[in-house]
Amino acid sequence: MKRIRINAGKIGLIFKKGDFQRVISRGAHWLAFGESVEQYDLTRRFNPVEPLELYLNESSIIELIHLINVGDNQIVLKYENGNFTEVLKPGRYAFWKGLIEYNFKVIDLTKTEIEEEIELLALKRSELVPYIRVSKIESFENGILFLNGKAIKVLTPGEYYFWKNSVDVSVSKVDLRQQQMEVSGQEILTKDKASLRVSFYVQYKVIDISKALVDNKDFEKQFYVLIQFALREYIGSMTLDQLLEDRDNISRYVFNFLETKVMELGIEVKGGGLRDVILPGEMKTIMNQVLVAQKQAQANVITRREETASTRSLLNTAKLMEENEMLFKLKEMEYVEKIAEKVGEISLNGNGQMIDQLKAIFSGVKLDK
């Protein structure tokens, strides 16, 4: 006989000649001849030396353990006293009852979306990282969930978790903020065969993500091409002079052209306009020459107009002076005064006739010829 003791938190299995006999718990026990004992910690997994399957027919052991079978397409989340502690992979596991409160969540990995109630902190734990796919939709985005290439549903802003399995999971996202598309440096021929380059910008927003991502491929490229078509169609129907005279008509035409067509792309045009019209070097020279000629012609017209007005004014003055002798004398004195302002000294050489003439000018008396 041999006396042994099982301490608190332990359990013992009695064997005789390698065969399981019975279970003993806390306290002192006597072992018969040929019996041996194996002690196990109740806070740890039951992991015997012999295969676990040898103990599964023993009701005395089955009553004392949690037996967990994990299939090939499963994992099990193990909780101890309410806290997540471990991921159990495919296989068979046994945990002792009584000392620790265990809970187990069986996860079917053949499903894609996580339907089980799992705490967010547990989902972010390193133990679960190998089994989870994460997709984040920002506050200014929407997304579409694709499973094996099939559109399933629209995803609004937030974090989404999916189980990793053989299903191909992808999320396509679209920015819902107002954006700008610019078509720059487009070389286009006008109706009169003038070559020019234009830059045009359009502000837009995505309003239907399903049309943008599911019904159309590369909707932004298609939008770009539509703007190109609108510009070429309008500019090709106008002469260079017509385009330069009213550039606003280009914007109105492009917006009208896009209004219905972009609805099929799931977007809405919010605004925009023509940024630049660039002429080739030779065309610039010609346009500058035309501009100089126009300005010169305008200057000549103004000059002739002023000369005509001046001549008309002189004619009117002459008529008044002819009709009014006093006005003639006043005008004569005005010129003499202007002459006198510029002359410091006058020396007269001559006979008395010259002096008499000067007197006559200032006295207003006519001399006989």
Image (tube, grey):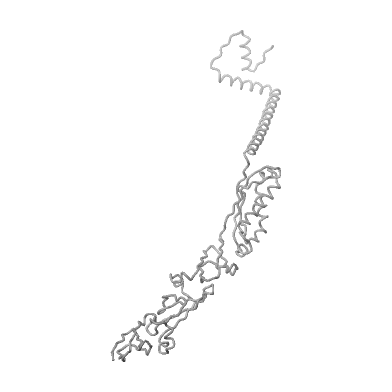
Placement of 94 over or under 180, stated as above or below: below
Residue for point 63% across, 13% down = 357
Q: Quadrant of the N terminus?
A: bottom left
Q: Decide which of 43, 247 is in the foreground and name it.
A: 43
Quadrant where the C terminus lies?
Answer: top right
Res 297 quadrant in image: top right
Q: In this view, does 78 lie to the left or right of 366?
A: left
Report whether 133 appears left or right of 364.
left
The reply, left or right, for residue 217 in relation to residue 46 is right
Q: Which residue lies furthest to the front in this view?
A: 17
Q: Is residue 304 visible?
A: yes
Q: Relative to the observer, which residue lies in front, 156 or 114?
A: 114
Q: Residue at left 29%, top 87%?
A: 5
Q: Where is residue 121 in the image (x, y as percent from the top left)?
A: 44, 71
Residue 252 makes an appearance in the image: no
**Viewer-proximal residue, 278 or 14?**
14
Is 11 above or below relative to 72? below
The residue that appears at 32% across and 85% down in the rendered structure is: 8
Residue at the farthest top position: 351
Report the label total. 0
Provide residue 164's location: percent of width, then percent of height: 51, 70
Measuring from the top left, give residue 178's x and y in whole percent: 57, 58
Q: Residue 265 at x, y = what percent?
A: 63, 60
